Amino acid sequence: MTHPGEHLLKLSGVSKHFGGLAALSGVSLHIKRGEIYGLIGPNGAGKTTLFNILTGLYQLDGGSFSFAGTSFSCCKPHLLAQAGIARTFQNIRLFPNMTALENIMVGRHLRTHSGIWAALTRHAAARREEREIAQRALELLRYVGIHRHSHTLAKNLSYGEQRRLEIARALATEPKLLALDEPAAGMNATETESLRVLLQTIRNSGVTVLLIEHDVKLIMGLCDRVAVLDYGKKIAEGVPAEVRNDPAVIAAYIGGGT
Amino acid sequence: MRNVPDFLRPNKRNAWLAFVALGLLLLVLPFATDALLGRGWVRIVDFALLYIMLALGLNIVVGYAGLLDLGYVAFFAVGAYTYALLGSPQFGLHLPFWIVLPIGATLACIFGALLGAPTLKLRGDYLAIVTLGFGEIIRIFLNNLNAPLNITNGPQGISQIDAIRVAEFSLGRSQELFGITLPSVHLHYYLFLALTLLVIFISLRLQDSRIGRAWMAIREDEVAASAMGINTRNIKLLAFAMGATFGGVAGGLFAGFQGFVSPESFSLMESIMILCMVVLGGMGNIGGVVLGGVLLVVLPEALRNGAGPVQQVLFGKTLIDPESLRMLLFGVALIVVMLWRPAGLWPSSQRQRELEAHDGEAQQEQDTVYDASR
Ligand SMILES: Nc1ncnc2c1ncn2[C@@H]1O[C@H](COP(=O)(O)OP(=O)(O)OP(=O)(O)O)[C@@H](O)[C@H]1O
Ligand SMILES: [Mg+2]
């Protein structure tokens, strides 16, 4: 599963400021291929900001990161998706008035090619591609367990289903790294447990997972390694059991952080 | 599933019958209109077809991609003036129709991309304002490009534009075909109908394609769309360019049909009318947009022609000038439709589902309340 020493994502000294606020200051970390890497920290620590930088929604103003051997210092979102980073959003961002199936089909955009001409003529290759897109989308719906709802508008799905749909849509882009921003937020214990199983399956399929989560049990049970952010700085990193007993981490969570 | 071919559907036969009936109706429409309402009305039907083309073009930008464009008439103007300048005594150029129309469409397409490029970062209201300005700039240019070098002939416009003509077959005068005499307006009708059907076909095909889905994704959530790997810049430009191309084609046809163009025809009010057709009919739904186009061309004309006589009958004299009454009723109709059917007269099935789903949700909520109170 893990190929030791092989890094998929390397951050070196990544910083991001909003006015006077340092949302991230000098964060460095390495994520290995095939692991589930947890990112935790109190509210406002900069976790989502880090995701936004990795997916090109924000431009970093210090440091750099490299992904799968390519260095990115400022980049458009679609190029990062192309490179193989897919994400979900903390406050779910589906395409609300499109069906579940169509949402995932949009995720296939990146790996398919049909243009205007193909759309107008629907020649053999175009039809084949369109069929493949629909088939793959259905498979993914089944994979995350919501195929019953393929023709339901995304916004009419339950909260847990929306979270799953978002994961399926991200998987449709064939990512190397799947970045999940609090996927268990608002889920009950059963839903969280099935999410855990799903994430395990995804990891076993060879996708590296970067996970922001507040649910300590989920993090402890799932992650190979964890990094802790506080006020934009990495204050600890290591295997979950180790990090949990780190005095700096305890202090940050109790509210005594710098 | 959506991709099931029509012939597998159980109601295939009825659909075919309806299709054939509609085809026949469209075929005899100019003759029926001519006989029942007079030649003037055939002309109005021709204009309705032009406006349907425009509305369908705008529907790509506004309905599919969700980009509010208030300057759409600029592309109509580009198409019309291209035709006028290349096929009139203005420069003594009389290029054939089948060369001029594609040139106009291409130019409109380029202008679409030109307008799109600087507005890519703008959304909603801001985009609306910039596009509105663009529409006005084009009109003002056309109005003032008569000095020092006279290009557009300024506010007087360009007249004596060549009729639409392929080889020796001119749509500008009556023609004998299969023993039937077809007046000029009828001939235009058939050409416009063919092109409108083509535009409908293109819209339908685009709607259910990879590109169409990308447009809708941008409409729904641009940030999520870009995170899913959609190059939002290119896809938005494509929407602007496609929509503008349709506008350019309609513009060329307009110039050839009317024989005269002036900047007056391309005012902000026109852009708003076209937008109304899209919104009133049902944004994103081709049937709705066609309906909107027909209604907004035919109803005002009916009011114009009918308001005077009706008042004469009712009050013995004309109390309100038909022209002002027309605008008044138009405003009232808009408000009523928007209150009564906020998604348009004929919303897209998706919007429909959306509204139904809302009812479902409300029902569920009620059920929960009911459960709780038990
Ligand atoms: N676009 C922005 N403009 C200004 N400030 C921002 C912006 N985005 C984030 N911030 C600030 O950066 C800091 C880090 O925010 P971020 O959303 O990354 O925190 P987080 O770790 O994800 O917190 P949470 O657990 O609440 O999601 C916060 O103080 C936030 O207010
Ligand atoms: Mg966050």
Image: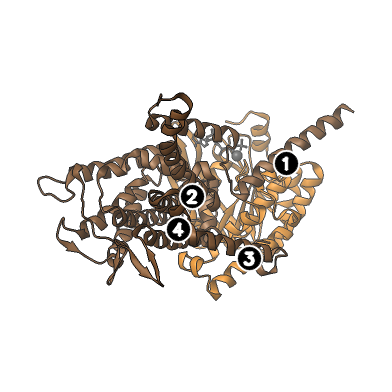
Chain colours: A orange, B brown
What chain letter is assigned to the residue under label 4?
Answer: B
Q: Is residue A186 left or right of residue B227?
A: right
Q: CA distance from mark 1 to mark 3?
A: 58 Å
Q: Amino acid at mark 1?
A: Asp
Q: Mark on residue B138?
A: none
10 Å crowding of disc 2: few (<14), some (14-19), many (20+): many
Q: Which mark lies nearer to you, 2 or 3?
A: 3
Identify the residue position indicated by label 2 in the image. Answer: B65
Q: Is residue B225 left or right of residue B16?
A: left
Identify the residue position indicated by label 3 in the image. Answer: B16
Where in the figure is residue B336, as x and y percent of width and height?
55, 32
Rendered position, A126 above or below A88: below
Q: CA distance from mark 4 to mark 2?
A: 38 Å
Residue beneath the point at 39% across and 31% down: B322
Q: Mark on residue A215?
A: 1
Q: Which mark lies nearer to you, 4 or 3?
A: 4
Mark nearer the N terminus (4 vs 2): 4
